Structures are given as structure tokens and as C-alpha cells.
Image (cartoon, rainbow, N blue to C red):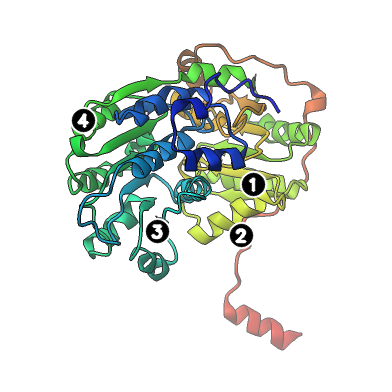
Amino acid sequence: MDTSHLSNVTFAELGIHPLLIKALDDLGFSQCTPIQAKTLPLLLQGKNVAGQAQTGTGKTIAFLLGVMNDMLTLPAIEGRRPNEPRAIVMAPTRELAVQIANDAVKLAKYAKFKIRVVYGGEDYEKQRSRLENVDILIGTTGRLIDYYKQHVYGLEAIDCVVLDEADRMFDLGFIKDIRYLFRRMPPANDRLNMLFSATLSHRVQELAYEHMHNPQHVQVEAQQITAKKIREALFYPSREEALPLLVGLMNRLQPARSIVFTNTKRAAEHVWACLGGNDIKAGLLTGDVHQKKRLRLLDELMSDKVNVLVCTDVAARGLHIDGVTHVFNYHLPDDAEDYVHRIGRTARAGAEGDAVSFAGEDFAMNLTAIEEYIGHPLPKLEIKPEYMAELKPSLPLQQKRRHPTQRRNNRKNS
């Protein structure tokens, strides 16, 4: 197994509670990733942390270990009731909340914490009933506030609070919700506070200063992440060349699991229809896709029923998918930070991956800002004839429905 993404620091030498070490051993984790090696010593000392780290760097394990170790070594607040969690983790998306909860259950194997996850879109009454007895509460802010206002659970006994992907919280407009919850918890100097973000921008640092009581800033640079394990490539296709090039590259590379990013829903639908029309099993994930369908699409990708997921940025925020070998930027993103978020979907946990970007006529102007942000130029490749596919005509996205009278007339004439 490749361990080049790990540090020389082991979990055992940090003084983590034995029940957590036992669970880590079962998972095969012995060495820390860089973000874990930098944050865990601070968290074990009870210091607050504002960490900069991309997805796939091990930050979830870092903050969960910090939370659980604190709960195992300190008594709960006196008079705590069963429906008052000791720790709360706020995430920007339902998929991320579910992923965090799955990891938490594995780490709490021997500690026996009651872990609950809440999010919008489904299982309202079922999620509500499970909050009668909870130690660690994980969820999206909308559903957390909904249940809190109904007095389903309380925040008076919070010992630890985690805000994951804080920059995405801003992007999605959740900051008012976060501040609402923070203000109803015990004072910041009376709890362990953790904030993680891909960038420690001014607005994220301001949030940390306001609600986290002098957190220690820890950074794992984005430039290090993009350059180490991800092979980047850039093509300059015209509008007419973009789809034949995408299909041709997929036919040549045969990625086992890949994601295609577009900047608009309309483009995503067009790309998805083209891939399907050319015998490439693809799913479509845009911002208006219902939660049950989102989860089904992710399951289909993980079970190899589809090989490609075509996404917009809004839909893909917070997605954590293992085994993605290729990311295709059909459009260069308008925000340079989004480039790092996108390509970070591959090369996770020490694996290698490929990120192929198209600097098309409509979005080539975004390239300068992206290269400046990541600290290196993207390798330019020539579009060769053998890279281009001869496309089959794709079916229309929706066939026009005939008026019921037409169907009745057709039946009469048949």
C-alpha cells in the first residue's frame, strides 16, 4: 500500500484513548496524515483549531478523534439529559453528513457513543425519534435548527462543536444558521471548537474569531495537494470539438469511475445525453435532483452501474466518493478555488488520479486565475485526431408529449 501521503507520526504516540486506538487498529490506520499530525496534538490538549485542508486529506478522522477523545476523558456537564448531545458536527450537505456519521460509527466501535445524523429530504419522523438519546449529533443546519426549535433536543450540554467545510457553508448561504446554533451553545471558552475549510479566507477567519475562542490556525497548502498525486492536463477544444474530445478520451482511458464537471445545468444535461447516446453509462447530478435520487445515483456509481457522474458545482459540493480515477473539467470553473475542490475528488487517501481540463472558448479566461492560485501552469496537450470520437446522434432529453385528444384519435384510427 502506498503510504507516501502519510506523516511519520503514529496515532499511538499521541496519547489517544485506548478505545479509539483499538478502533483505528481495526481500520488499519496507524500513521497520521499531515492534517491529523498537525491538529490532533492541539485537540488532545484541549486547544481550539481552525484547519485548512482539502477533501481526502483525513480531516474527518482528525476532528472525530478530537471529539471522541474529549468525551472519553472529560465528564459530561452535570444534569445532562439523554436528548442533549455532548458534541455537534455541522456539514454543508446531506451526503457529507452521512459520510461523517459512517466514519464516526466505525471510530466509536468500542466507545459505544450514540451517534445520530439528521438532514433534509427524507425520514423526518424517524430522524426525530432517534434524537431522544444522542451523544454525537451530525447534520445539516436546516434540519438541526428545525428540530431544535421544536425542542426535540437541546444544546445546553455541548462539549465539542465542529464546523466542516466552512467555506462551502458561506457559498451555500448557511452562515446565519450556523450563528443561530452557536449562540445557543455554552460559551466558546467552555467547549472544544473545530473549524475546517479548504481556504482560511477573511470571512472564515472572522467566523472563527467570533465563535471559537482564539483557535490555532493549521494549514495544509492547496498547492501541495494538487501537485503531489494528481496528473493534470489541459486541452484547448473549440465548441464543436469539446464533446467528441470528451467521448474520445473516455473511450481511450476507460476510467473505472469518473466525474465530469460543467458550469451550468443546461451543459450538464447536454453532456449527459451525449455520453448516454454514445454507450457510456452516465448519471446526471444537478442542484434540483431530489435527495433520494441523489443517493441512488451515488450508490449506482459506487456499485459500477454507472461509470460517470456529470455534475454542476452546486450539486457536487460535499460529495465524497472513493475510487474516482478521473475528473474532467468540461468547463474551467469561474472560481479558482473550485478547481482544487473538483480535482480533489480523485487521488484520495494516497491514491493517484488524473484531472483533465478543457479551456474552451467560453471559459478559457478563467485559466490565469486557476494557475495563479495553484502555483503552477497546467500541462498543455495537443488535440490529436485519434483522441476524437465520431459521435452517434444523442436522443433528445425529453420527448414532446402529445395532447390526450391526439392519443384518443390515434386509438380510434388504429
Residue 286, position as x, y percentages in the image: 51, 48
Q: Earlier in the sequence, mark 1 or mark 2?
A: 1
Give the number of the disc on residue 120.
Answer: 3
- Residue visible at 38% across and 70% down in the picture: 125
Q: On the rendered image, what quadrant is the C terminus found in?
A: bottom right
Tag nearer the camera, 4 or 2: 4
In the rendered image, which residue does mark 4 sit on? Answer: 213
Q: Is residue 47 left or right of residue 234?
A: left
Tag nearer the camera, 4 or 1: 4
In the rendered image, which residue does mark 2 sit on? Answer: 398
Q: Amino acid at mark 3?
A: Gly
Q: Amino acid at mark 1?
A: Trp
In the rendered image, which residue does mark 1 sit on? Answer: 272
Q: Earlier in the sequence, mark 4 or mark 2?
A: 4
Residue 46, position as x, y percentages in the image: 30, 31
- Is residue 186 in view? yes
Residue 118, position as x, y percentages in the image: 39, 57
